[in-house]
Amino acid sequence: MHTYIHTHTHTYIHTYIPIYLPTYLPKCIHTYIVHGNELADKVVKEAAQSIDTRYEYTRIPKSYLCHVAAEEAKQKWQAEWITSNKADATKQYFPSVEDRLGTKPTLTAKLAAVLTGHEKTRAYLYRFNLRDDARCICGHNDQTMDHLLFHCEKTSTQR
C-alpha cells in the first residue's frame, strides 16, 4: 500500500470536502458522489506524481508467505531425509524429497510395503526368524525387493 498517497488523499479530502458538502444532500447525492470521485482521482494523481513520494511495502501477500513456508519445510525435510539412518528402502526409490514430491503414486498396501521395506520377501521373513534362509530361489543373493526388481534372473522376463 502506498502510505504517502493514502495519507495525502485522506488529508486533502477531509480538509476540502466539507466545503462542497451541500446542506440538501438527499436531493443532489449523485452530484456530490461524482464530484467526490473526481476530487479523489485528482488528489491521488497529484500525490503519485509528487517528487517526495515514498514507496512503502508493508504488506506481503499470503500466497508468498505460504510459498516461503513450504520451501523452508522442504529444506528441513530434506536435511532430515539425508541425515536419517532409517527408511533405506524408501530412499532407494526416492533419493530426495523433491523426487518424492514430484510423484503422486496411488498408495496401496502392497506399494506401501515395498516402499517401506516391509514386503514379504525371504530376506524380510528371515529377519524375523520366520524362514530358515534368506536366499532367493535363483541362488545368487538374498531375496530383497531390490534384488527381485533389478537383478534376479527368475524375474528378468517380467522386467
Image (cartoon, rainbow, N blue to C red):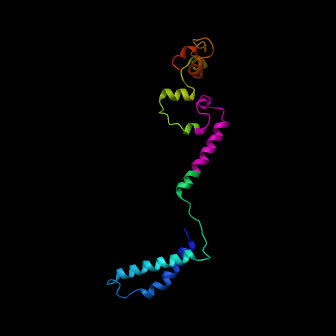
Please tell me in which quadrant of the rendered image residue 31 appears. Answer: bottom left
Estimate the x, y position of residue 146 in percent, counting from the top left. 59, 23
Magenta-colored segment: predominant secondary structure: helix
Task: State how many labels appear.
Answer: 0
Q: Position of residue 134 (x, y in %)?
A: 61, 15
Q: Residue at (58%, 77%) from the top-left corner?
A: 50
Asked where in the image residue 137 lies, by quadrant, the reply is: top right
- Nearer-the-camera pick, 66 or 48: 48
Residue 110 point in image, percent of width and height: 49, 26
Q: Please report the residue visible at 53 percent of the width from the left and 55 percent of the height from the top.
A: 63
**Within the magenta stretch, is there residue 91?**
yes
Q: Is residue 74 above or below residue 25?
A: above
User: In the image, what residue occupies the spot 54% across and 26% down?
Assistant: 114
* Residue visible at 62% across and 29% down in the picture: 88
Choose between 71 and 123: the one closer to the eye: 71
In the rendered image, residue 53 lying in the magenta stretch gets the answer no
Quadrant of the drawing holding the N terminus: bottom right
Q: Of all residues shown, which one is farthest toward the left?
A: 27
The furthest residue to the right: 83
* Front residue of 82 and 149: 149
Q: Looking at the image, is 87 positioned above or below residue 45?
A: above
> Which of the two residues, 104 or 128, is positioned nearer the viewer here?
104
Residue range (magenta): 69-98
In the rendering, at what x and y percent does residue 103 appear?
52, 36
